[in-house]
Image (cartoon, rainbow, N blue to C red):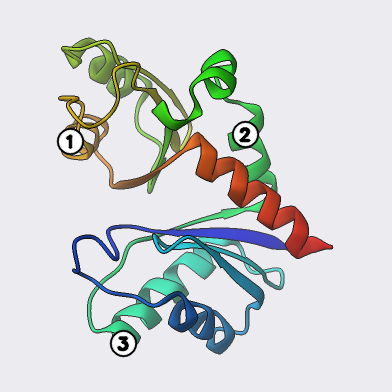
Amino acid sequence: MMHVALLRAINLAGRNRVAMADLRALAGRLKLQNAQTLLQSGNLVFTADTRPAAAVERAFEAASERTFGFAIDFFVRGEDEWRAVVADNPFPREAVRDPGRLVVAFLKDAPKASSGKALQEAIAGNEIVRVKGRHAYIYYPDGQGRSKLTAALIEKMLGTRGTARNWNTILKIAALSRATQS
């Protein structure tokens, strides 16, 4: 079964360095197969036995701290859940017209519906947020660089940790996962 693992806050400004070859090797030590990485920001596609995604996530987090010397949050999604991330996108026009400004935040836990609404109401700019389960779709029409809608605010309002990828990366990971299964 294909899985995707997203790592949070690695290889940023020279901190929390993780070489992608080392990440693939870690996957091998965890008995995961066909591990492939995309970019240097911690995107890993692999196949696994019938272990649930949550069990793989816990195994990665425990092993990565021993291997790399610091804690890393992993966000693991199974094949069906990854497909749903793409299919359930509430911003289809923006995905085609402006994919670099469409972001999906992958969350550890599904927030309460009221938290997603409260986050949207707290936004001072033009950003639009739609929360679906353990995913928050965010469109930054003016770009993320100057936005007041930061990861810290999102996590505070939703009450859970997350890591985000833009739509271009989401589609590249989807393509890589299809190739991994072939």
Name which quarter of the figure residue 110 lies in: top left
Provide the secondary structure element on which disc 2 rests: helix
The spot of residue 42 in percent (x, y) is 42, 63
How far apart are the alpha carbons under marks 3 and 2? 33 Å
Q: What residue is drawn where x is 71% and y is 68%?
A: 50
Dot 3: what SS? helix
The residue drawn where x is 40% and y is 27% is: 101
- Vertical order, 138 against 51 (above or below): above
Count of number-bearing discs: 3
**Left or right placement of residue 1 versus residue 154 in this view:** right
Label 2: few (<14), some (14–19) or many (≥20) C-alpha neighbours in 10 Å? some
- In the picture, the quarter occupied by the C terminus is bottom right
Identify residue type, mark 3. Answer: Arg
**In terms of depth relative to the viewer, which is nearer, 109 or 26?**
26
Q: Earlier in the sequence, mark 3 or mark 1?
A: 3
Q: Which residue is mark 1?
A: 156
Q: Give the class, few, some or many, for how many residues have Cα within 10 Å of label 1's Cα (few <14, many ≥20).
A: few
Amino acid on which disc 2 is placed = Val
Q: Nearer the viewer, mark 3 or mark 2?
A: 2
Q: CA distance from mark 3 to mark 1?
A: 28 Å
Left/right placement of residue 107 relative to residue 2 reads left
Q: Which residue is mark 2?
A: 86
Is 98 on the left or on the right of 117, as rendered?
right
**Residue 22 image point, x, y percent:** 44, 83
Give the residue number, with chain letter if any, for mark 3. 66
